[in-house]
């Protein structure tokens, strides 16, 4: 679950309990040019990105499993 979307300053990513108990996930935030802006390892069930310095626009969250396999891509919008 990603909230809020659209967002202004902070973006939160929360994993369902069954996902964060079974394995770790890498969370990457990239811009529309493919530049990696944020990377975190989910081992507590959630992560947050302080996006105050980011420009308004479209960004993508990529969720990968511990082996590096892409599991999900989520489009988010910064106001």
Image: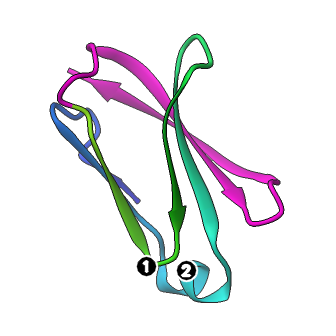
Q: How many numbered marks appear? A: 2
- Residue 56 at x, y percent in the picture: 26, 14
State which quarter of the image contains the C terminus: top left
In-image side of 13 versus 41 (left or right): left
Separation (CA) of disc 1 from disc 2: 7 Å
| Crowding at mark 2 (Cα within 10 Å: few <14, some 14-19, many 20+) | some
Q: Along the line of sight, which residue is nearer the eye, 12 or 3?
A: 12
Q: Earlier in the sequence, mark 1 or mark 2?
A: 2
In the image, the segment drawn in magenta is: 52-79
State which quarter of the image contains the N terminus: bottom left
Is-magenta flag for residue 23?
A: no
Quadrant in the picture for residue 13: bottom left
Circle number at residue 44: 1
The colour mode here is: rainbow
- Residue 11 at x, y percent in the picture: 28, 45
Q: In this rendering, is residue 70 above or below 60?
A: below
In-image side of 70 versus 42 (left or right): right
Circle number at residue 27: none
Q: Are marks 1 and 2 in contact (CB under 8 Å)?
A: yes
């Amino acid at each position: 679950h990603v909230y809020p979307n659209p967002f202004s300053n902070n973006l939160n990513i929360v994993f369902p309990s069954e996902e964060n108990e079974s394995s770790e996930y890498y969370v990457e935030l990239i811009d529309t040019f493919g530049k990696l802006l944020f990377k975190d390892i989910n081992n507590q069930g959630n992560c947050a990105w302080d996006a105050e310095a980011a420009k308004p626009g479209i960004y993508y969250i990529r969720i990968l499993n511990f082996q590096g396999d892409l599991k999900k891509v989520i489009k988010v919008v910064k106001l």
